[in-house]
Amino acid sequence: MRREIDCSTRDVVYVHRTSDSGCSIKKRFDVSRNFEFNFGLLCQQACAPWRPILGDLKTVVGAVEFADRSFRRPTNGWGRQLRATIPVSDYGEWNREAVVSRLRNTLNQLTGDSWNLTFYKRKTEPNHVSQLCFALDPAISAVIPYSDGLDSYSVYVIERARLGDEIAKVRVQNRVATRSSLERCFTPALFRISTEDDYKKESSYRSRAFKFLAHGAIMAYLASAKSIIVPESGQSSFYSVLVRNAMEYPHYGSHPEFTRKMELFLNALLGTNLRIETPQLWFTKG
């Protein structure tokens, strides 16, 4: 049985990288001061009740991104030994072996690193999310994470022709949504980490797919949708795995091996039966 970790009087994410020589490099950010996210716009389309574990998932995404981008990869090699210590509200749920092991396997597959994740009970409760639940008409059956790129736009247009108003776009952004952005047919989700030093030192950013699918899962849960659609073509799914550059780890961002692991993790965590679908898997960008 794991003991709760007494990090401080505040809720702090600690990330570590252990080098081959055994040296440990540590960084941290204060969840209440340096991490900002907003569910308000997602909750406007909700027909399922809010759960604190959704806020926990957002915090975990922040910790993963912070660790992934804070530590440079070795000059001669690829993988890193990464550890993250994360405050969560639903401490018992995050420490279930079915959740921890699937999360670790998902991140290892995606980034090519070795992840060690530890959770401790939050000392302060996150801001309460006010929410009115109502049945959507027509109901949303699928969610697509949207990046404003050509791939995501093309897949969205194709799937909208099939699903009509039953498909919803969710986009991750680092600024507060304005009225003009609300009129662009997607639901923006605020996500921003701010620290005194620039933490974005590693450019490979392989955890990006984890971030986008996690936001898609939050939207799917709140909207009672059944599936998350991967906005990539088969070229993005397979070409980047088969064709590598030097010591670069294969890019599994939309590969079925990764999306299946992500699906298992999300369903274990949320108690859902979400499907992550890749409808354009056998098509190229053309």
Image (cartoon, grey):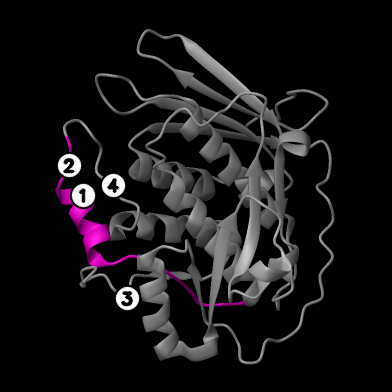
Q: Earlier in the sequence, mark 2 or mark 4?
A: 2
Residue 154 in the figure: left or right of residue 213: left
Q: Residue 241: which numbered mark, if any? A: 1
- Distance from disc 3 to disc 4, alpha carbons, whole Å, reads 19 Å
How would you rate the neighbour count of disc 4 (Cα within 10 Å): few for under 14, some for 14-19, many for 20 or more?
many
Any magenta on residue 166? Answer: no
| Mark 4: amino acid | His
Which segment is the magenta one?
224-245
Q: Quadrant of the N terminus?
A: top right
Residue 158 in the figure: left or right of residue 60: left
How far across and how far down the image is residue 108, in percent?
37, 40
Q: Which residue is mark 3?
A: 279
How would you rate the neighbour count of disc 3 (Cα within 10 Å): few for under 14, some for 14-19, many for 20 or more?
some
Closer to the camera in the image, 222 or 118: 222
Can residue 95 be seen here? The reply is no
Q: Residue at x 67, y 49 (%)?
A: 56
Q: Which residue is mark 4?
A: 251
Any magenta on residue 226? Answer: yes
